Amino acid sequence: MPSPQKRKGDEFERTVCDYLRHNGFPYAERTRAGYQRDTADIHLDPTVGLAPGAIGQAKKVRTPRWREWITDLREQINNARADVGFLIWKLWGVGDPGEQLAIMPLREYVVLLRRAGYGTPLQWHEQCENCGASITWIACPTGGWWTHDNHPADNHDAITQVQPPEDVDDRGHWITPRNLKGVVAHRAEQV
């Protein structure tokens, strides 16, 4: 028989899952406990054979352990091959599931903001390998290109090995790279 804490935690997960189902995520489902590779408590948009886009890890404890939970969340995101993940922390004395806290690293939050259409195209700056001058990436939905900030007298094209990901993926979502030098898109880094 499960402990009272386990039962309360399961009840919280069910409440959150029901809330998500009624607020735009009809396929949200709880995962089963006991798997060797933890993929969080709730998958918001599970599709058979495909990785979930977003996962949630429910926490119903009085004292938060943020550093530990964020470390675990990163592992769960990777295990689930999800785009983003967040913590759902139960506020004591608050019964409304929509008023519980959703907590995530700023990096993943920025991904969500950009996918929602906020922000401007990312600016990428490098140096031309031919002349050493400053070059900038010009983003375009059909494919971008590098250009010199001040075009050189010999009219050569901007040359660099760096290829930024396009600003929008094939689903129309903004792509936010995790680091500029590696030029690795957020989703590609996890696959």
Image (cartoon, rainbow, N blue to C red):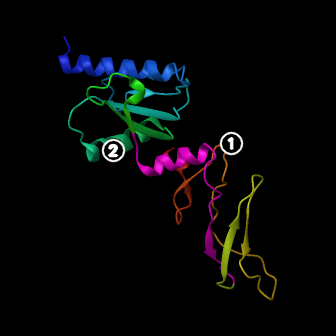
Cα–Cα span, label 1 and label 2: 28 Å
Dot 1: what SS?
A: loop
**One can see residue 57 in this view:** yes
As for residue 106 lying within the magenta part, the answer is yes
Task: State which quadrant residue 170 falls in.
Answer: top right
- Indicate whether 85 appears above or below 45: below
- Quickly name the residue at label 2: 70
Q: Categorize mark 1 by other alpha carbons within 10 Å: few (<14), some (14-19), many (20+).
A: few
Q: Are marks 1 and 2 in contact (CB under 8 Å)?
A: no
Q: Categorize mark 2 by other alpha carbons within 10 Å: few (<14), some (14-19), many (20+).
A: some
Q: Quick one: quadrant of the N terminus?
A: top left
Residue 166 image position (x, y, % from top left): 67, 54
Q: Which mark is residue 15?
A: none
Mark closer to the chain start, 1 or 2: 2
Task: State which quadrant residue 50 falls in.
Answer: top right
- Indicate whether 127 appears above or below 43: below
As for residue 172 lying within the magenta part, the answer is no
User: Which stretch appears magenta?
Assistant: 103-130
Amino acid under label 2? Answer: Ile
Residue at position x 50%, y 20% in the image: 21
- Quickly name the residue at label 1: 172
Residue at position x 53%, y 47% in the image: 111
Q: Nearer the viewer, residue 86 or 30?
A: 86
Q: Is residue 141 left or right of residue 4?
A: right
Residue 151 image position (x, y, % from top left): 77, 82
Amino acid under label 1? Answer: Gly
- Label count reads 2
